[in-house]
Image (cartoon, grey):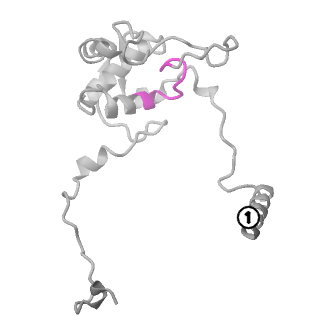
Amino acid sequence: MPALAQSSKPATTQASFGFGTEPTKEELSRFVSSLPDGRGLPTGSGSVAQGKVIYDKDCAVCHGDKLQGGIGDRLIGGRGSLVNRDAGKAPIKTVESYWPYATTLFDYIKRAMPLTAPDSLSNDDVYAVSAYILSEAKIIAPDAVLDAASLAKVRMPNRDGFVPDARPEKFPAAASVSMNRQAQVAKTK
């Protein structure tokens, strides 16, 4: 018998590993996503004009001074390029042409931007930058102010450009039978 199996002490499990601390409600709230209908969006507001100042300071270095892209993605343009495109020409995927909900823009900026300091912008800053991007894409007015209620009402140009995935969670019966048959054949080999 191996030496370890001959220990006189019964095996025990450790109740707690003692790593980290329990997160606060505020810390947990950062992990709750905002939904397309606006649920989960935080309080705050920001104007297009405020957003331009923040964009120029924190975003233009990667996304370009006119949102045209650079080392970061292009943010505007390409409207209709997903469906009206020449054969072999890739669509232009931007906030304007691809994203179905403006609330997703807010959520992404809040969590991931700027790249060098994610989650460093205040809610007001993120509403403002979102307003600036959406205004430059001519989705909202140049004098718009966004908050949770108004952002959720923004209708993105490609909202209806997505097809729901109707596949069931489980394989259809015919596929299951085929897979089971393949498994049985494999076992007999």
Q: Main secondary structure of the magenta part?
A: loop
- Occupied quadrant, residue 161: top right
Image position of 183 (left or right of 152): right
Quarter of the C terminus within the rendering: bottom right
Most foreground residue, 42 or 101 = 101
Looking at the picture, how far across and down is residue 153, in whole percent? Answer: 48, 27
- Occupied quadrant, residue 187: bottom right
Q: Which residue is mark 1?
A: 186
Q: Is residue 96 magenta?
A: yes
Looking at the picture, how far across and down is residue 177, in whole percent? Answer: 79, 62
Q: What residue do we see at 63% from left, 27% from top?
A: 160
At label 1, which amino acid type do we have? Ala
Taking the view exactly as shown, the residue that stands out farthest to the top is 66
Segment colored magenta:
94-105
Q: What residue do we see at 54% from left, 28% from top?
A: 100
Image position of 91 (left or right of 140): right
Per the image, label 1 sits on a secondary structure element best described as helix
